[in-house]
Image (tube, rainbow, N blue to C red):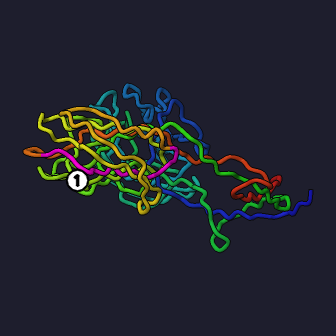
Amino acid sequence: MQTVKEIVKHYWKREQIEQPWTQPVLSANGTIGGDSFACSALNTDTRTAPYMAFDSNKTNNFTAGWLSKAANNYFEWYSPKALNISKLDIQYMTSNSSAVGYLTSWTIQASNDGETFVDILSGTDGNFGLTTINIQHSGYYKYWKLLPLTWSDEWYCIVNMDITATQLTETITPGTAENYDFYTSEYIYKAVPTVIRHYWKREQTEQPWTQPVLTADGTIGDDSFAVLASAFKSGNETYKAFDNNTSTMWCPVNASNPASHYIIIYNPNALNVSNISVTNRQDTTNPTAVSAGIIYASNNNEEWIEISNFIGNTTAKATWNIDLSLNENYYKYYKFYISSGQYGSSSCGVAEIKLTATQLAETIIPGTADDYDYYTDETIYKGVNI
């Protein structure tokens, strides 16, 4: 098989995106500079550990700050993704116990290499219980230190520390040949394109048809069953003769001669109608029925042929049939035309019109090069990525 080799370059950009950060719960100090959140401290009471400030257990605590070891004393925490810290909530002991107090002055420092630290904020506030430190700055750092300067007793004790922060996370997004940080190459072997021709035949198949129930007239000539009358009395619209409800009806006129009025019945798939069932209006015993008429058929709504003359049943509330069993053809349009009808103090009305029919539906089946209605071409590339 003949093939061609292509080299495709994909261009990429690195982006740092600000995202919410959730403080992990620690069960050990971890490793500063490692792959996960960690903490450490100098001058720690051997009975406590730095992680106890982050273990979500307020019965444990981190205690440090022995007065004789104040030089270079600090409490440090680390995140592998740089943080922008906006607030520290520090929970000290609620009262003095065993010479343990709280910080009375401090400096917060930050770094991105763990060696060179910059001062972020200094303060002198602190007390037993909860102390909140609001930090106003715009930088992102991986290493953070709380550098105690003075404290209220021999030791200071942090029961719990909650950090409010956002983090910077690197994401890789598609770039362009003019704007990218790096690219990857993909080698592709492609077969010479092959065109396959598919042959198709259209077939009209006879299928069962069920008359839809209408809630509106619809649009003649559109893609669904619809009806249209020459006229209708307000409240007795055309579709009400096709709503499967004999308590409603279509009335062409108000208590006057219904002759020459009609309903056009349309279906997008041509129908072979073998019978039309007509139900007279049900709300009166007055003679108000269609007494005679003509059924016409068409496939374009312009040229009509007569397929039946009928005599109606004028009995009040009757249901009667128009036999079209001799009709062998399929049409999209049928016209129910009134030649004469009974009327008087009440209008001539039709409660229901129901068609018994089969429909012609187009199906597409495979053809051959010698017997087809149309064809489609498919271009196929077969290749292997390496």
**Residue 212, quarter of the rendered image:** top left
Looking at this rendering, what residue extends furthest in the bottom direction? 178
Looking at this rendering, what residue extends furthest in the right direction? 1
Identify the amino acid type marked 1.
Ala
Residue 208: horizontal and vertical position, in percent?
50, 36
Identify which residue is drawn at 55% across, 46% down: 361
Residue 223: horizontal and vertical position, in percent?
44, 53
Residue 194: horizontal and vertical position, in percent?
82, 59
Name the residue nearer the viewer: 322 or 252: 322
Circle 1 — which element? loop
Horizontally, is 143 left or right of 197 in the view? left
The residue carrying mark 1 is 259
Identify which residue is drawn at 48% across, 55% down: 110
Q: Residues within 10 Å of mark 1 (few under 14, many from 20)?
A: some
Disc count in the image?
1
Looking at this rendering, what residue extends furthest in the left direction? 345
Query: Magenta: predominant secondary structure element?
Result: strand
Identify which residue is drawn at 86% across, 63% down: 5
Horizontally, is 301 left or right of 176 in the view? left
Residue 177: horizontal and vertical position, in percent?
67, 71
- Can residue 327 be seen from the camera position used here? yes
Relative to 55, is 307 above or below? below
Q: Which residues are magenta?
A: 328-343
Residue 330 counted in the magenta span: yes
